[in-house]
Image (tube, rainbow, N blue to C red):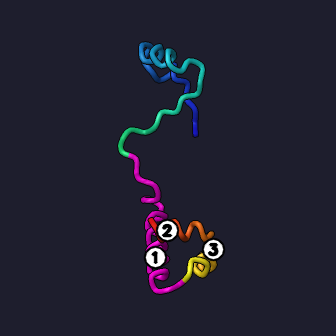
Amino acid sequence: MKYINAAEILPERLLQELQTYSGGNILYVPKAGTKAGWGTESGSKTFYQERNRKIKTLFKEGNSVDELALQYGLSSSTIKRIIYN
C-alpha cells in the first residue's frame, strides 16, 4: 500500500479538519462504494457452505461427529457447531 501525504492532495480546510481528529497519526481511507461480502469474490463462502451442507447430510445419514471430524480434518466441536447451527 502506498502512502500519500494528505497535504499534497487535500484542500487546506479538509486537511485542518482531519488534523483535528487524527493529527500526526496514520489514517486509512477506504475506497468508496459497497464492499463485497466475505468470500464472495474468492469463492470461499460457496466452498464452505457446500462443505457444511455435506457434513449436515452425512450426520443425518448416521455418521458420527468423530467420524466427520476425522474425514474433514476438523475438531469435533467445529463439526458440532456446523451441525447444530
**x, y percent for residue 8:** 51, 21
What's the residue type where badge 2 is placed? Ile
Left or right, 2 with respect to 43, comes to: right
- Please tell me which of labels 3 and 2 falls first in the chain: 3
Image location (x, y in percent) of residue 20: 50, 15
The residue most toward the bottom is: 61
Q: Which residues are magenta?
A: 35-63
Quadrant in which the C terminus is drawn: bottom left
> Residue most toward the left?
33
Residue 47 shown in magenta = yes
Q: Is residue 51 magenta?
A: yes
Q: Are marks 1 and 2 in contact (CB under 8 Å)?
A: yes
What amino acid is labelled 1 in the image?
A: Lys
Q: Which type of secondary structure does the marked residue at label 2 adopt?
A: helix
Instruction: Tell me residue 26's x, y (percent).
Output: 58, 27
For disc 1, the marked residue is: 56
Image coords of residue 81 (percent x, y): 51, 65
Badges 1 and 3: C-beta atoms under 8 Å apart? no
